[in-house]
Image (tube, rainbow, N blue to C red):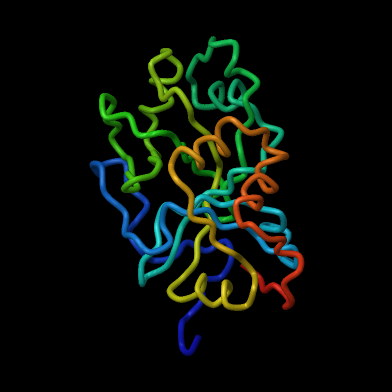
Amino acid sequence: MSSAKKAPVGESPKPSQIPSAESSISYSADHLANQFLIAMPGMVDVNFAGSVIYLFEHTEKGAMGLVVNRPTEVDLATLFDKIELKLEIAPLLDQPVYFGGPVQIERGFVLHEPSPESAYSSSLVVPGGLTMTTSKDVLEAVANGQGPKNFLMTLGYSGWGAGQLEEEIALNGWINVPLSREAMVEIIFNTPSGQRYERTMSHLGFDPSHLSGEAGHA
């Protein structure tokens, strides 16, 4: 890759994909959006080693996604208490909050299945895929028992500047895995977090550890 400027890890790329609290539903671009990225076995960046990422945006300006297999020690009960919402739904209390990536780690992101009957104030709908919501109203709906049936809450997201992800894929840092929405839902919401990497990798049909090359930093 020639003159593409990389966005430093932990620094938010410039594209305007992250919806603001005032935005309405928007639709992401195509390309690698709505696919999984899995870190190759040689990934040396501790933020991403062994990670599975759901990409919700990929344009000429950069890419954005959420790590879906890195639970933190924070659970939903603790997080809801911090944002002054009362969560009393027993199955959800111990559900972990995930590390979504090293960018804006103080900000929450909710990945969930599309729910046409529920319009949240700040959502990004991935055509043919999942929905990413950043507004508090989705958590209010969860607390009231009217939220998405399946959802995953993260703190932070993963971001790449223009051309950066393409370069890292070329350097064997990542491999993309396109799957049906049903298969992605099964992995993200119905597979234990410790098995999501292997389950996603099994769809490749070969063992990536047999590939040569040293992975770069994400």
Horizontal arrangement in the rendering, residue 112 relative to residue 157 (left or right): left
Relative height, residue 8 to residue 128 (above, below): below
Measuring from the top left, give residue 35's x and y in whole percent.
47, 54
Q: Residue at x 65, y 53 (%)?
A: 201
Measuring from the top left, give residue 187's x and y in whole percent.
58, 39
Relative height, residue 84 to residue 107 (above, below): above
Q: Quadrant of residue 190?
A: top right
- The one of 169 and 5 positioned closer to us in this rendering: 169
Q: Residue at x 39, y 38 (%)?
A: 133
- The one of 185 and 165 positioned closer to us in this rendering: 185
Q: Residue at x 45, y 16 (%)?
A: 143
Q: Residue at x 54, y 61 (%)?
A: 176
Horizontal arrangement in the rendering, residue 150 relative to residue 195 (left or right): left
Measuring from the top left, give residue 47's x and y in whole percent.
68, 57
* Residue furthest bottom in the image: 2
Measuring from the top left, give residue 204's x and y in whole percent.
61, 57
Q: Quadrant of residue 147?
A: top left
